[in-house]
Image (cartoon, rainbow, N blue to C red):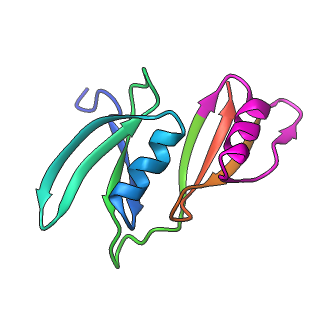
Amino acid sequence: MIITGLHTVGLPVIDQDAARTFYEALGFETRLDVPMGEGARWIEVAPPGAPVTLALEPAHADRPAGVETGVRLTTADADAANAALRARGVDADDVLRWPGVPPMFAFRDQDGNGLEIVEG
């Protein structure tokens, strides 16, 4: 097989330092932060122990910030995660529940990028 895994998912951000601070406040660790030229950096963050990272990429006209990312993060307790994010001032929706589907909720980062947290 040519493709053997998933390494990182890119998120467009307006200010890489503000984005890094936001995700670190959620408990993410910075795995990589190196210069890319023209003032930009390659920054990867992830929850401790997670095999896949989020790359905090500079937003631009073809890839603006403030979009629904399709990124789904996991937690052991959606209600507790929701309460913790709201206590930190994060824009988080109510926890949704459907029969046979794990509890989940959406939230937005500092640039309005939409992500979801799923209990699992």
Q: Is residue 93 above or below residue 78?
A: below
Q: Is residue 69 above or below residue 112?
A: above
Instruction: Name the residue located 47 percent from the left edge and 30 percent from the top edge.
Output: 47
Q: Is residue 66 left or right of residue 46?
A: right
Please give left or right for residue 107 compared with residue 94 in the image: left
- Residue 18: image quadrant is bottom left
Q: How many marks?
A: 0
Q: Extreme right residue here? A: 99
- Residue drawn where x is 16% and y is 46% of the image: 34
Residue at 60%, 31% in the rendered image: 74
Whole-percent x, y for residue 103 in the image: 78, 34
- Segment colored magenta: 74-102
Q: Is residue 95 magenta?
A: yes
Between 47 and 98, the residue placed more toward the observer is 47
Residue drawn at (70%, 37%) of the image:
84
Say which of 62 and 87 sits in front: 87
Nearer-the-camera pick, 25 or 8: 25
Q: Quadrant of residue 12?
A: bottom left
